[in-house]
Image (tube, helix red, strand yellow):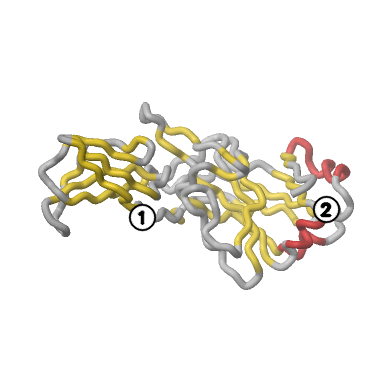
């Protein structure tokens, strides 16, 4: 995407003078306080995402790795905008060619829960990689407008969307993990697992036969592998619980 930059309230609409005549300028904000599903106010630096959804389609939600679940959605912007429990007035410029490509559809702004647990048990934000949040626990829509308005040759193509008290309710999609290998080396067992999400904490459960209520083992995954002393049970299952 060319010539895309972000400007917040301090620059105001005067920033429009720097935009090409045909570029689209989208502005949005929340009044706050915006809250996580547990009722706590969003942390400064929390992520708001601008998403485009194709005409006739419904927003498919985020996956836990920060990507979008549906091919009919497109992530336009993900940025650590939260300050003082809300999203400040934000102005975002989209290159005219990209805006024209996205003319048939709608834009919506989503508040994301990107909290993670550090090894010391403290709560931190996951941060960003390749233009998206590394971890997304849940999301909440905070405003939308038609994309058609974003293609007009006006200085501010999309009117500001200001909503208050956004509250996260929709959890992201976490796929079930899969055991890909079990290796017994003397008294040690190694269980290799694929598809574990950074938004969850996983445990190995053992039982003597399929369907039994299992016992969780005291083992943590390292590079996708659990290693533990050989237990009494002979069947293993990996289960995960959301961190937030």
Q: Position of residue 74 (x, y in %)?
A: 63, 57
Q: Tell me: 59 left or right of 9.
A: left
Q: Nearer the viewer, residue 69 or 13?
A: 69
Mark 1 packing: few (<14 Cα in 10 Å), some, or many (20+)? few
Identify the residue at horizontal 50%, vertical 36% (top origin).
Answer: 125
Mark 2 packing: few (<14 Cα in 10 Å), some, or many (20+)? many
Q: Position of residue 66 (x, y in %)?
A: 53, 48
What is the distance, in whole Å, between disc 1 and disc 2 at their CAs?
A: 42 Å
Residue closest to the far bottom: 56
Helix, strand, or loop for circle 2? loop
Q: Nearer the viewer, residue 11 or 135?
A: 135
Q: Tell me: 34 left or right of 207.
A: right
Identify the residue at horizontal 24%, vertical 43% (top origin).
Answer: 183
Q: Image quadrant for the C terminus?
A: top left
Above or below — where is 153 with respect to 27?
Answer: below
Above or below — where is 124 with respect to 76?
Answer: above
* Disc with the residue nearer the chain's start (1 vs 2): 2
Q: Tell me: 115 left or right of 202.
A: right
Q: Tell me: 76 left or right of 12.
A: left
Q: Position of residue 7 (x, y in %)?
A: 74, 40
Q: How many marks?
A: 2
Residue wearing tag 1: 176
Identify the residue at horizontal 79%, vertical 45% (top origin).
Answer: 3
Q: Position of residue 27 (x, y in %)?
A: 72, 50
Residue closest to the far top: 120
Q: Is residue 109 visible?
A: yes
Above or below — where is 147 with respect to 80?
Answer: below
Q: Is residue 38 visible?
A: no
Above or below — where is 208 with respect to 123?
Answer: below
Residue wearing tag 2: 23
């Amino acid at each position: 995407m060319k010539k895309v930059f972000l400007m917040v309230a301090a620059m105001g609409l005067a920033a429009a003078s720097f935009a090409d005549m045909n570029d689209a300028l989208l502005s949005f904000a929340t009044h706050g306080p915006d809250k996580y599903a547990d009722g706590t106010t969003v942390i400064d630096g929390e992520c708001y995402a601008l998403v485009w959804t194709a005409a006739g389609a419904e927003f498919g939600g985020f996956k836990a790795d920060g990507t979008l679940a549906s091919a009919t959605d497109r992530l336009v912007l993900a940025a650590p905008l939260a300050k003082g429990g809300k999203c400040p007035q934000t102005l975002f410029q989209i290159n005219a060619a990209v805006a024209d490509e996205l003319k048939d559809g709608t834009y919506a702004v989503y508040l994301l829960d990107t909290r993670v647990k550090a090894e010391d048990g403290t709560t931190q934000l996951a941060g960003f990689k390749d233009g998206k949040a590394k971890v997304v626990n849940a999301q909440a829509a905070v405003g939308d407008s038609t994309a058609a308005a974003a293609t007009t040759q006006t200085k501010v193509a999309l009117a500001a969307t200001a909503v208050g008290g956004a509250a996260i309710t929709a959890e992201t999609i976490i796929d079930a993990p899969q055991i890909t290998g079990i290796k017994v080396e003397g008294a040690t067992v190694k269980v290799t697992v694929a598809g574990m999400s950074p938004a969850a904490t996983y445990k190995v459960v053992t039982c003597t036969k399929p369907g039994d209520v299992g016992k969780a083992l005291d083992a943590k995954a390292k590079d996708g592998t659990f290693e533990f002393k050989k237990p009494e049970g002979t069947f293993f299952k990996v289960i995960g619980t959301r961190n937030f």
